[in-house]
Amino acid sequence: MYKIGEISRLTGVKEGTVRFYEKCGFLEEVKRLPNGYRAFNDHHIFQVMVCDIVFDSFVNSRIRKSSMKLIESARAWDSRSFADSLSEYKTIIRTDIRRTEKAINIALDWNFDKTDDGKVYTKKQAAELVGTTPEAIRNWERNGLIPQSEAYKKRYYSGAVLERMYVIRLLLDTGYSIMAILKFLNFMDTGKKKAAGKELTDPDGWDLQSKADYYLKALNKVLKDTKKIENLALTHHLLN
């Protein structure tokens, strides 16, 4: 059994943060001694360290959702569930990296929205390929980022519109506002590439290239951190 100060020392996580993890339900139930002090165990050490790694890494909403499943399986201390959650977490990160690399290549080519391979995609298919949701695509339509469909008519998207969606997702993930993205797309649609580039450059000089590179680097760090989690799980005998 460990006191909270010992947990903090062993994990490198501040006592207040450990209490926060406990309050959020990220740790299995912590026993109380007759004097009221918390009595942590070895499971808690692992769970605190997993939380620390997950929350220290850059995440977007897709990866965050999967990371919470990982934390839940660590709390349950079920080796099979944890192995499945970790595998899913890695797959989602790798998929996000692949989609991001594709989006970067399309966006930085400065000639996107031109592909027409003759294929069409439903809203659900487009969402799965791009890595977003049908609701998000519907919102992009309402905001004029992609052409709107006719009322009460099922919508199909061309390869050109699909590439446009990849770019939109990348810009949103890297922190651009809907308004900035709309201006950028309008400039691109009218052939004003220089103006489009300026629209994506902030006062500190960060442009799409630099933000995209930073974002991709952060995603790769999240993937690298999964190895730390795996090694911890092996050390604590949660994985065989």
Image (cartoon, rainbow, N blue to C red):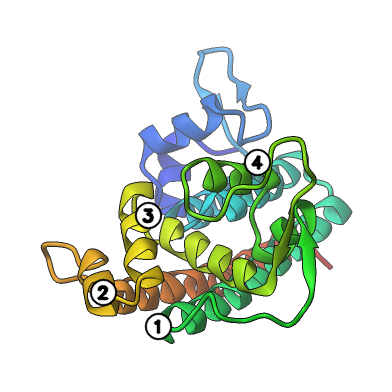
Q: Nearer the viewer, residue 216 or 87?
A: 216
Asked if the residue at tag 1 contacts the one at tag 4, i.e. Cβ–Cβ closer than 8 Å, the answer is: no
Q: CA distance from mark 1 to mark 3?
A: 15 Å
Residue 197 marker: 2
For disc 4, the marked residue is 135
The mark closer to the camera, 3 or 4, is 3
Where residue 195 sits in the image (x, y, percent)?
22, 72
Look at label 3 and name its amino acid: Leu
Residue 189 vertical placement versus 37 (above, below): below
Q: Residues within 10 Å of mark 2 (few under 14, many from 20)?
A: some
Q: Tell me if label 4 and label 2 are in contact, CB under 8 Å.
A: no
Which tag, 4 or 1, sits closer to the chain's start?
1
The quadrant of the rendering that contains the C terminus is: bottom right
Cα separation between marks 2 and 1: 9 Å
Mark 2 or mark 1, which has the lower sequence index?
Answer: 1
> Distance of mark 4 from mark 1, alpha carbons?
27 Å
- Name which of mark 4 and mark 2 comes first in the sequence: 4
Left or right for 102, reference 202:
right
* In this view, the mark in front (4 or 1): 1
Q: Are marks 3 and 4 in contact (CB under 8 Å)?
A: no
Q: In the rendered image of this protein, does residue 128 appear above or below residue 13?
A: below
Amino acid, disc 4: Glu
Q: Which mark is residue 110?
A: 1
Residue 142 higher or lower than 30, as above or below: below
In what element is the residue under mark 2?
A: helix
Q: Which residue is mark 3?
A: 182
Instruction: Check whether the beta carbons of the residues at disc 1 and disc 3 lie within 8 A of each other.
Output: no
